[in-house]
Amino acid sequence: MTRDNALFLDDSFPLPVDRPFTRSMALGAGLTDRRLGALVRDGCLRRSIESVYVPTQVPDGLDLRAETLLLVVPDGCFVCDETAAWLHGAPMAMAPNSHLEVPKVSYFRPADAGRLRNKLVTSGERTLTEDDLMEVRGILTTTPLRTALDLGRLRRRDQALAALDALLRLGVFTHEELLASIERFARQRGVVQLRWLVPLADGRAESAGESALRLRWYDAGLPRPQLQIEIVVDGKVVFRLDLGLEELLFAAEYDGVEWHSSDDQVEADDSRRGWLAEQRRWLIEVFGKANVHGFHQDADRRLAAAFQQAKATYGTRTFII
């Protein structure tokens, strides 16, 4: 059956349509891999993690994520890294382009419990304290703070800063707690990166692209930026700029595909930025994925040049006859 252009399963489906199920459960109910693949392509099912299917009509949320993980995480294990961030509600911490493939589950055993080996998971052993773990809907997981610290030191720095930003954004630990936790990893893998990135972490970042753009800003040697700069008209906030220096009327914005690619979105962006340039004299530099990510990124160079231009033209932009 269909509703709002989505295809929904009905009672003729051989498994309950209000909860997730594994591939083995589906095969046991008489479905085949070919049929499962067709249902995914038709939009009746989605795959949130490896080997688990979710009927489209089941909304995402904490309960569903925990129920999904309960199907695949063995007893005596805890989830961590990207899987823990996903469970805690911080998908911005996921690896770049994770939406293009079904992610493996990251679960580990305590360091003295033996290593897990499974092609469907990212697994192994990890040393933690009791304070590093918590239970969420029956799933043992690293806390948001420990998850942030692990991703901040063990992932490449673009994803690492995005993860720190995303988990800090949850509001369950403070930036001071994050700073105070760095040295527990002294002489461990990734601690040098952690020391550099944690002071830059900011929960106001709203996308992984914004976090990466902020790294390019620092790579360009620019002063610490303000985030989510509010543009006020008649006492009401009408726009927010991703990051910049309000004292120079200089900002940088990241245009991700999800919110800045349709004709209507592009037109709205152009109108907003045109008004800011003409009426408020802002100099705004705009970046997309290719500018910020990859070997050929040019954001650091462009930011440095735009910053110099902002300083050089500030007087003429703000001069009133």
Image (spheres, helix red, strand yellow):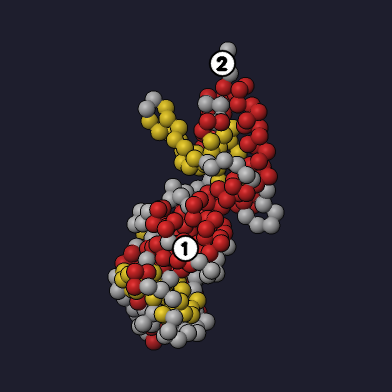
How many marks the image carries: the answer is: 2
Displayed quadrant of residue 136: bottom left
Residue 142 on image: x %, y %:
39, 69
Judge by depth and name the residue closer to the eye, 308 or 72.
308
Q: CA distance from mark 2 to mark 1?
A: 52 Å
Farthest residue, direction left: 137
The local secondary structure at tag 2 comes to loop
Q: Quadrant of the N terminus?
A: bottom left
What residue is shown at x 37% (from left), y 78% (from top)?
A: 71
Disc nearer the start of the sequence (2/1)? 1
Q: Residues within 10 Å of mark 1 (few under 14, many from 20)?
A: few
Residue drawn 52% across the image and 60% down it: 194
Location of residue 16 in the rendering, given as x and y in whole percent from the top left corner: 31, 75
Residue 222 falls in image quadrant: top right
Which class describes the residues within 10 Å of circle 2: few (<14), some (14-19), or many (20+)? few
Asked whether disc 2 touches disc 1, contact meaning CB atoms under 8 Å apart, the reply is no
Q: Among all residues in the image, which is located at the extreme right?
A: 296
- Residue type at tag 2: Ile
Give me the residue at 48% from left, 80% from top: 124
Kindly identify the amino acid type of the residue bearing the numbered disc 1: Glu
Q: Is residue 67 visible?
A: no
Instruction: Measuring from the top left, give residue 22's x and y in whole percent.
Output: 40, 79
- The residue at 34%/57% (across/down) is 172
Disc 1: which residue: 183
Q: Is residue 147 left or right of residue 281?
A: left
Residue 210 horizontal side relative to residue 203, left or right: right
- Quadrant housing the C terminus: top right
The residue that disc 2 covers is 320
Asked whether 98 or 22 is in front, the reply is 98
Where is 232 relative to 6, above or below? above
**Furthest-top residue in view?**
321
